[in-house]
Amino acid sequence: MKNRIKKVRDIINEAEYDSLLIDSDVNRFYLTNFTGSAGRVLFTPENEYFITDFRYTEQAANQTDGFKIVELNKDVVESINDILQRDGTEKLGFEAKTVNYYQYGKYDEKFKDIELISTEDLIKDVRMIKEENEIEMIKKAIEISDKAYEHILDFIEVGMTEKEVALELEIFQKKLGGSKNAFDFIVASGKRSSMPHGVASDKVINENELITLDFGTFYKGYCSDMTRTFVLGKANQKQKEIYNKVLEAQLAVIDKIKAGMSGVEADKIARDIIEDAGYGDNFGHGLGHGIGVEVHEGPNVSYKSEDDLKENSIVTDEPGIYIKDWGGVRIEDDLLITKDGCEVLNSSPKELIEVSI
Ligand SMILES: [Mn+2]
């Protein structure tokens, strides 16, 4: 991962700190390709280290590239301090959103004569722009989810519980190479579909209800995230009306989104359409978010976003309308942002499907 080491080096060269300690699991994986569960990455003024214990030194040597592997033989914080002192660190950047109060206290106590500098979202900004191989892995994760959706339309029957559907999605994705669920799947049927995050329950699925599935999988460390809403049986007029309004908003985003737009502007494309239809209060979440080594990462695409969309970011496009005591609709694709527009990475159909029963 020498190109990523260089990206971090460029950040350090511009920053007020001369060294940087990476504590977060996802950033460790992103920078090193190490898939084990314990290890820290340390950049000092001259060197890059991967610090881990006896269980993982062999794996780290095999998986990582460009790091000096350090095997711990005493307290990790003392070991890090030894390296910092030897390499002449004066100011150390640390990940403020990852390091907890207890750890911070340890760093403060043990890192003698070293000033601790708080950093936020540092690697997140690097992660927002996907490299070619990352795009390939995300596409593969999405392909698995698309196939799982096709399968579930065949599988689902009136009388099943939401949890049975969620379990089948999980098994099917894993059979196709998915390593783990991207999050707790949402299977929300009938009135429960008015809850944007209605995690699968013991509720039995009845005929003619709206069903929202929101699911995804990891593939080689990268994830997919998709949502479809459909009806098991026949849709009524109101279900069709709400569905088509959400679809109109979702498609308008695909049509207009592009690099250089702000997250707020992209969100507004969908929000204007839903507001004009009188459902502004029923779309209470942002349009989308980046995906990658985490299912929610930068750039944020919402009315609260401070991010801009860049070429080769991958973001979700997931407007919804939720009506209490009635139900809801959300449709979500993953989009690769390009210079002039976007590439829709999902291939599942989006017209309202009425599954025959
Ligand atoms: Mn999502």
Image (cartoon, rainbow, N blue to C red):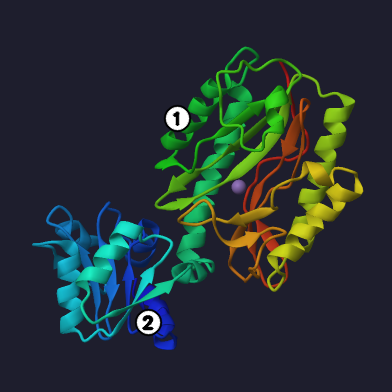
Residue at point 61%, 24% (across, down): 154
Q: Residue furthest left?
A: 73
Mark drawn on residue 171: 1
Say above or below: 30 vs 183.
Answer: below
Q: Which of the two residues, 211 or 286, is positioned nearer the viewer here? A: 286
Q: Quadrant of residue 269?
A: bottom right
- The C terminus lies in which quarter of the figure? top right
Mark in front: 2 vs 1? 2
The residue carrying mark 2 has its beta carbon less than 8 Å from ligand 1: no
Say above or below: 326 vs 283.
Answer: above
Question: What amino acid type is highlighted by mark number 1?
Answer: Ile
Residue at point 57%, 29% (across, down): 151
From the top left corner, tell me how far across and down residue 10 is, in percent.
Answer: 42, 84
Residue at point 55%, 45% (across, down): 143
Residue at point 74%, 36% (across, down): 329
Q: Is residue 252 visible to the viewer in this orientation of the structure?
A: no
Q: Quadrant of residue 266?
A: bottom right
Question: Do tag 2 and tag 1 residues touch (Cβ < 8 Å)?
Answer: no
Q: Secondary structure at mark 1?
A: helix
Q: Which residue is mark 2?
A: 9
Spatial CA span between label 2 and label 1: 41 Å
Question: What amino acid type is highlighted by mark number 2?
Answer: Arg
From the top left corner, tell me how far across and down residue 34 is, in percent.
Answer: 29, 59
Task: Tell whether 220 sits left or right of 327.
Answer: left
Q: Which of the two residues, 93 or 167, is positioned nearer the viewer here? A: 93
